[in-house]
Image (cartoon, rainbow, N blue to C red):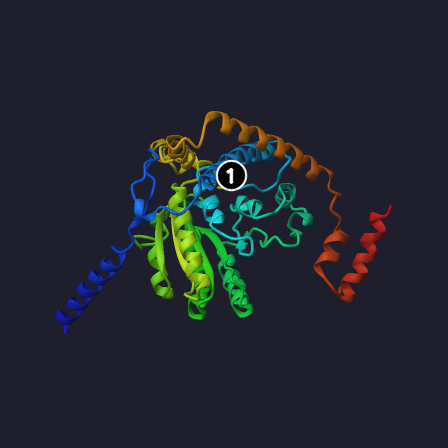
């Protein structure tokens, strides 16, 4: 009996290793901007390649200015994005306007490029209700603060799209730490069982705040967690915009063709702190690790690729940088000009039919605000 049990354990270990070995990292551009996987190259025009680079440069400037604005007290909550531009923007670039994005709190760039005005993104950071009064035709939800909750919501949105017969997908993001949450498994399992058109992305930036990925899970990859939900999983070089685009575009095609959801792990890195709320990455990350990932910078890699094709120049980049600075200046002015938030505003937009006990409080606040 003991011998049979030992043999079964050995077989189980071999089976696990066989599964883990299936998840090789998809890469198209290496760190020098050279194509190393021609077969996986997505079909993008020169104009599309330039537009993707423009968005990545613009967003890097937006990140730098947002950090400065936060330090000046002109923004509230902010989670830096530098280093994750390929993972965030190339995935959004692979979508269509009718697709829905359900972001985490670091994923504001995706919903800006999907149509949310920059001034409203700034207001969301300040906690102003107008920040997430989504304009008509912009298919995004507000950034989710609860870790992993957006995975369950995405399963619901995807099911709604499926019931309507829409040729659209719901896409969501979490970090590597989010894959340790129950909502992560529940959302993927539900969408997998229903074959709903969802794309689940885990941006593995190596640390859940200060907790390294290897302390989150014993799994060799996060991508293999898709197996338990019965859906395809893929690991992608998240510093390579072409690889991210190709993976998400293929996942979208599968989804709208009725083949169900896909889970994508993007290997990436955040150069800044977890958030601007007092996190100090030097306490848990080494300079050597930072330097190693800086060599993989998605902007540097993509810039080299485009320059070799004659599609990018220092002049083009300077124009993008100046445009970003000007847009940010105007957006913060608009945010500053927004009416001050009142308690009665929050009560009015929270309830379509206000409970009687709150109506009394509403009248008290209204009287105070009118003085």
Q: In terms of depth relative to the viewer, which is nearer, 104 or 331?
A: 331
Q: In terms of depth relative to the viewer, which is nearer, 206 or 155?
A: 155
Q: Which residue is mark 1?
A: 55
SS at mark 1 in the image? helix
- Up-down: is 122 above or below 324? below
Residue at far right of view? 371
Marker count (numbered): 1
The x, y position of residue 356, in whole percent, is 78, 66
Of the 4 image quadrants, the one containing the N terminus is bottom left
Residue at far left of view? 3
The crowd level at tag 1 (other Cα within 10 Å; few <14, some 14-19, many 20+) is many
The x, y position of residue 115, in whole percent, is 60, 47
Residue in the image at 61% along x and 44% along y: 121
The x, y position of residue 198, in whole percent, is 47, 60
The answer to whether residue 371 is left or right of residue 124 is right
The x, y position of residue 328, in whole percent, is 62, 34
Q: Quadrant of residue 119?
A: top right
Can residue 206 be seen here? Answer: no
Residue at far bottom of view? 1
Residue in the image at 87% along x and 46% along y: 371
Q: Quadrant of residue 237?
A: top left
Q: In terms of depth relative to the viewer, which is nearer, 122 or 231?
A: 231
- Up-down: is 289 above or below 3? above
Can residue 198 be seen here? Answer: yes
């Amino acid at each position: 009996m003991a011998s049979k049990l030992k043999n079964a354990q050995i077989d189980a270990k071999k089976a696990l290793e066989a599964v883990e070995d299936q998840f090789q990292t998809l890469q198209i551009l290496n760190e020098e901007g050279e194509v190393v996987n021609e077969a996986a190259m997505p079909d993008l025009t020169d104009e599309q390649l330039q537009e993707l680079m423009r968005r990545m440069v613009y967003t890097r400037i937006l990140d730098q200015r947002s950090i400065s604005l936060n330090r000046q007290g002109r923004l509230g909550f902010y989670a830096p994005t530098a280093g994750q531009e390929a993972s965030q923007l190339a995935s959004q670039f692979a979508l269509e306007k009718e697709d829905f994005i359900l972001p985490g709190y670091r994923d504001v760039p995706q919903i800006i490029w999907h149509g949310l005005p920059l001034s409203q993104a700034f207001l969301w950071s300040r906690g102003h209700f107008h920040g997430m009064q989504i304009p008509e035709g912009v298919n995004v939800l507000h950034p989710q603060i609860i870790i992993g909750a957006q995975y369950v919501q995405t399963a619901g949105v995807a099911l709604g799209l499926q019931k309507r017969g829409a040729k659209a997908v719901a896409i969501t993001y979490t970090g590597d730490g989010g894959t340790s949450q129950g909502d992560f498994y529940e959302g993927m399992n539900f969408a997998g069982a229903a074959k709903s058109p969802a794309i689940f992305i885990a941006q593995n930036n190596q640390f859940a705040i200060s907790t390294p990925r290897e302390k989150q899970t014993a799994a060799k990859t996060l991508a293999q967690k898709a197996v338990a939900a019965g859906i395809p999983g893929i690991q992608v070089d998240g510093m390579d915009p072409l690889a991210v685009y190709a993976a998400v575009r293929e996942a979208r095609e599968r989804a709208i063709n009725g083949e169900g959801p896909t889970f994508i792990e993007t290997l990436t890195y955040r150069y800044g702190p977890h958030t601007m709320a007092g996190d100090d990455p030097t306490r848990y990350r080494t300079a050597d690790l930072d330097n190693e990932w800086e060599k993989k910078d998605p902007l540097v890699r993509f810039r080299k690729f485009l320059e070799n094709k004659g599609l990018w120049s220092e002049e083009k980049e300077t124009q993008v940088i100046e445009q970003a600075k000007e847009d940010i200046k105007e957006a913060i002015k608009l945010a500053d000009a927004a009416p001050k938030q009142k308690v009665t505003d929050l009560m009015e937009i929270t309830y379509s039919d206000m409970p009687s006990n709150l109506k009394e409080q509403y009248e008290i606040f209204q009287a105070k605000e009118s003085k």
